[in-house]
Each structure stands twice: as C-alpha cells, then as structure tokens.
Amino acid sequence: MKIEELINLSDNISNINFERITDFDSKKQLTDSFDIEYNNQHGVYIFEHNIEGIIYIGSSGKIDSQNKKTKQGIRLRILQGRFPYMISNSEIKYNYLNGKYNNNRHLRNLTIYFNNLEGNNFFTLPTVLEHFLIQLYYNETNKLTLINKKI
C-alpha cells in the first residue's frame, strides 16, 4: 500500500499534507536534505519503499503527565532512532533480535513522508495520528507494516 492509498481511506486525514524527502542514498544525504528546523517539531512520519509500499509508520513528540512533549523532534527521531529501526550509512536496518538487526533495505529505495502537527485542529497528539494510520493500514491489509512489528 502506498501513502496516497492510505490517506484516501479516511476523510479525517485527507487534509493533512505530508512533506517528502526523496533521492537520497546515504544517511549523510538524508541528513543534509532534512531541514534542521524539524529537530524540535513533532508529528508523524512514514517510510515508503518504492516497490513494497509503506514499511513503517512512526511519530515523535510523546506527551508526559505534565502535558510536555519530548524534546526529540521528527528529524532527530528519524535520523537517530535505534528501535525498531536504525538508519546506517546506506541502509535502514530493522528486525532487531539477539543483539543485531537482521534485515535491511537500501535508502535509495525509500521516500520519507512527514508532517508537523502544529496547528492541526483534529490531530494534536502525534501518537494518536500514528496509531490511526497504523489502524487504517491494518484494516486494509490485515497485517502490520514490515517494521511496525507490534502495537
């Protein structure tokens, strides 16, 4: 399933605009093309493989009991995440078992979609939108994405 198909499944998300980053084949190129302003902005991101479709749906900006969002923004979560995936020099690695990542996909085959939820009137908690998108994906495919192993 591609992102366009996922977004068309619900009127609740049809007005959410996702920015995208394409044409990178290394972590350095991805880092350079991802605006630093997203270090502190929170939202949802999707990894789409050019053949397999959506392989991961994630978010940054968890909220604690004092209504404060975590400091890690979208950019840092994508670039510095260690679980359930890790972006290395030219790959995204996943399926962490027995102290190592057991599967990978080349970065050159990915498009990253992301959305900063600031100013969104319906979805204000990134985790809620993340789980909503995963639910839509699951309802349509009867499985989780390749990297979202449990929810």
Image (cartoon, rainbow, N blue to C red):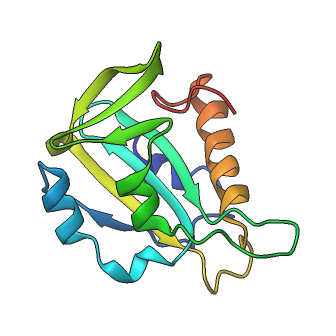
Residue furthest to the front: 99
Residue 127 versus residue 72: which sits nearer the camera?
A: 72
Left or right: 106, with 46 as reference point: left
Residue 30 versus residue 108: which sits nearer the camera?
A: 30
Q: Is residue 150 above or below residue 29?
A: above
Relative image position of residue 55 (x, y in whole percent): 42, 35
Residue positioned 52% across, 46% down in the render = 57
Left or right: 15, with 19 as reference point: right
Image quadrant occupied by the C terminus: top right
Count the marks.
0
- Quarter location, residue 93: top left
Residue furthest to the right: 65
Q: Is residue 132 above or below residue 65?
A: above
Residue positioned 27% across, 70% down in the render = 34
Q: Is residue 110 above or below residue 67?
A: above
Relative image position of residue 48 (x, y in whole percent): 35, 44
Residue positioned 52% across, 77% down in the render = 41
Relative image position of residue 17 (x, y in whole percent): 47, 72
- Quarter location, residue 19: bottom left
Left or right: 71, with 46 as reference point: right
Residue 82 versus residue 17: which sits nearer the camera?
A: 82
Residue positioned 38% across, 46% down in the render = 47
Relative image position of residue 91 (x, y in whole percent): 22, 37
Residue furthest to the bottom: 119
Image quadrant occupied by the N terminus: top left
